[in-house]
Image: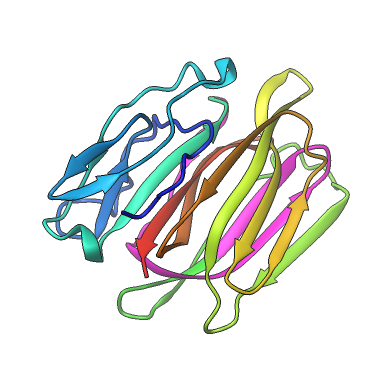
């Protein structure tokens, strides 16, 4: 069981990434109540926030025969503006996170390693509004450090009613953030015996929505 506690505001409408074909080590979790695939239960909280009511999905779906070695896509949280963006290789470890924030998260980027140890860079996703923001953050994880929880908020800016307005990353060693002013509706992704190894999103002027790849420890 990878996500033991309720995930606030859970939802998903993103398609599986190009790398997420059968046998390439990626599975996808759709928002909803408990489901079971291949003997593995996946829990994501029931949609309760009307801001997220446009998202749907009710099951856990694996693209591999062995979910113990495959990453799971959880999310997304946020709005439906911008364009979908995703990684290009099945992830094994998150190495670093960079972002610019102000009233909302302007953009995010990160580096991750695949199963062969190759380093990949994703992003920056967002930033088309070319705002200067209020802060730039760079998080580099130690070799034994991994992300065990992500929390954030969904809020408005300009004519965009739902963007990612703050993010906080919790690891087995430290808490980073929250970054962003944080106005809006909170969401939370707590993990048990698993870690966030990459992200996917919708992005344009800002970071409109975000989801996470989760892998068992």
Residue 153 figure quarter: top right
Image point (59%, 67%), residue name: 171
Image point (75%, 51%), residue name: 178
Along the horizontal axis of the image, is 180 left or right of 78?
A: right
User: How many labels were placed on the picture?
Assistant: 0
Residue 28 spot, x, y in % from top left: 30, 44
Q: How is the image coloured?
A: rainbow
Image quadrant holding the N terminus, namely bottom left
Q: In this view of the protein, which residue sits in the foreground, 193 or 63?
A: 193
Is residue 147 visible from the viewing direction of this image?
yes
Residue 97 figure quarter: bottom right
Image point (43%, 27%), residue name: 46
Q: Is residue 151 above or below residue 197?
A: above
Is 84 contained in the magenta span? yes
Along the horizontal axis of the image, is 103 left or right of 155?
A: right
Is 156 contained in the magenta span? no
Is residue 123 visible from the viewing direction of this image?
no
Residues in magenta, as a range: 81-110
Residue 212 spot, x, y in % from top left: 46, 50
Residue 42 spot, x, y in % from top left: 30, 44
Q: Residue furthest bottom?
A: 143
Q: Residue furthest front?
A: 5
Image quadrant holding the C terminus, namely bottom left
Along the horizontal axis of the image, is 2 left or right of 182?
A: left
Secondary structure mostly seen in magenta is strand
Residue 162 spot, x, y in % from top left: 65, 25
């Amino acid at each position: 069981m990878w996500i033991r506690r309720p995930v606030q505001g859970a939802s998903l409408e993103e398609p599986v990434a190009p790398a997420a074909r059968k046998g390439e080590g990626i599975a996808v979790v759709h928002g909803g109540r408990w489901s079971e695939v291949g003997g593995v239960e996946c829990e994501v909280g029931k949609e309760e926030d009307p801001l997220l009511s446009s998202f749907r999905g009710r099951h856990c779906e694996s693209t591999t025969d062995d979910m113990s070695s495959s990453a799971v896509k959880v999310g997304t949280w946020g709005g439906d503006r911008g364009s979908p963006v995703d990684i290009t290789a099945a992830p094994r470890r998150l190495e670093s996170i960079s972002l610019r924030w102000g009233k909302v998260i302007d953009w995010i980027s990160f580096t991750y390693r695949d199963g062969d140890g190759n380093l990949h860079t994703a992003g920056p996703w967002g930033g088309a509004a070319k705002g200067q923001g209020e802060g730039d953050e760079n998080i580099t994880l130690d070799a034994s450090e991994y992300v065990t929880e992500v929390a954030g908020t969904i809020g408005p800016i300009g004519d965009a009613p739902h963007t990612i307005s703050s993010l906080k990353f919790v690891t087995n060693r430290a808490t980073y953030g929250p970054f962003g002013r944080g106005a809006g509706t909170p969401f939370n992704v707590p993990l048990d015996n698993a870690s966030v190894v990459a992200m996917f999103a919708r992005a344009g002027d800002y970071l409109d929505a975000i989801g996470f790849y989760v892998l068992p420890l």
